[in-house]
Image (cartoon, rainbow, N blue to C red):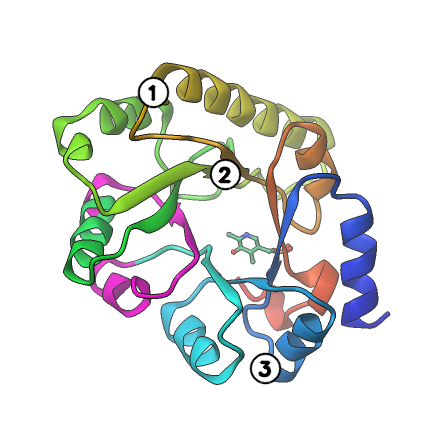
Amino acid sequence: MSIAENITEVKDSLGTCHLVAVSKTKPNEDLMEAYEAGQRALGENKVQELSDKAEALPKDIEWHMIGHLQRNKVKYIAPFVHLIHSVDSVRLLKEINKQGKKIDRIVPVLLQIHIAEEENKYGLDEQELHELLSSEAFKEMDHVDVQGLMGMATFTDDKDKVRREFKGLKKLFDKTAQQYNDEKLNLKELSMGMSGDYKIAIEEGSTMVRIGSKIFGERPGGGW
Ligand SMILES: *Cc1c(COP(=O)(O)O)cnc(C)c1O
């Protein structure tokens, strides 16, 4: 199947959920194939690769940063990134706010939550999320727009376990939105679901799935 056909197939099961096509490790020709098929939201997990591709490809592509982000690299993507999914510490959020202020841009982000029972070392836990959102430091950050939460389930064939993890994240999302949404904060996006588990994620309330190999084909060596 072609990239365009894969996108069509994935889109058929999305409903109102948005698709971020994860193009990491793939050559620009493949990204252009997705672009020609109408796909504008592309996801990358490395700053250098994302920047190079953004430079080379059409300007109306929406670039999503989905991988672990080092603070010293925020400045390279802050001017144009559409959404950073992977904010996993207060220090990183502060740096994004600082860079946003410098260029007078409010940078859209999601907070990454640790939901997998094993693996995945990145992400805030529930306690850290509450500490962040209720802190004075956060109230003073006026150059970040926290739009929601992101999480990755355990990489496993155990579908019940994956569903439990997504359910837990959705519950935390609802609770947090109810508690904190106000004039400044509007949590509305829930980024969860990848090639192997997006159907479960959608059933459990995802608003945004991040799908790579199912669209672009397997990455050599898994390509994380
Ligand atoms: C690579 C990656 C994806 C996509 O993975 P696939 O299994 O290829 O769909 C989604 N989210 C993150 C954070 C990733 O690093």
Q: Secondary structure at mark 3?
A: helix
Mark 3 and mark 1 in contact? Answer it, CB < 8 Å: no
Q: Nearer the viewer, mark 2 or mark 1?
A: 1
Q: Which residue is mark 2?
A: 151
x and y, in percent, of residue 80 in the image: 37, 65
3D distance between C-alphas at marks 2 and 1: 19 Å
Q: Which residue is mark 3?
A: 28
User: In terms of sequence position, does the residue under pointer 3 or pointer 1 come before the other?
Assistant: 3
Give the quadrant of ligand 1: bottom right
- Determine the residue positioned at 61% across, 69% down: 221
Depth order, front residue of 224/37: 37
What residue span does the magenta drawing correspond to? 70-91
Q: Secondary structure at mark 1?
A: helix
Depth order, front residue of 9/101: 101
Q: Which residue is mark 1?
A: 180
**Residue 25 drawn above or below residue 87:** below
* Residue 72 within the segment the image draws in magenta: yes
- Determine the residue positioned at 26% across, 56% down: 105
**Residue 136 drawn above or below residue 100:** above
Three-letter amino acid code at disc 1?
Answer: Tyr
Left or right of 217 on screen, residue 59: left
x and y, in percent, of residue 89 in the image: 27, 41
Depth order, front residue of 82/96: 82
Crowding near pointer 2: few (<14 within 10 Å), some, many (20+)? many
Q: Nearer the viewer, mark 3 or mark 1?
A: 1
* Residue 77 within the segment the image draws in magenta: yes
x and y, in percent, of residue 205 in the image: 63, 29
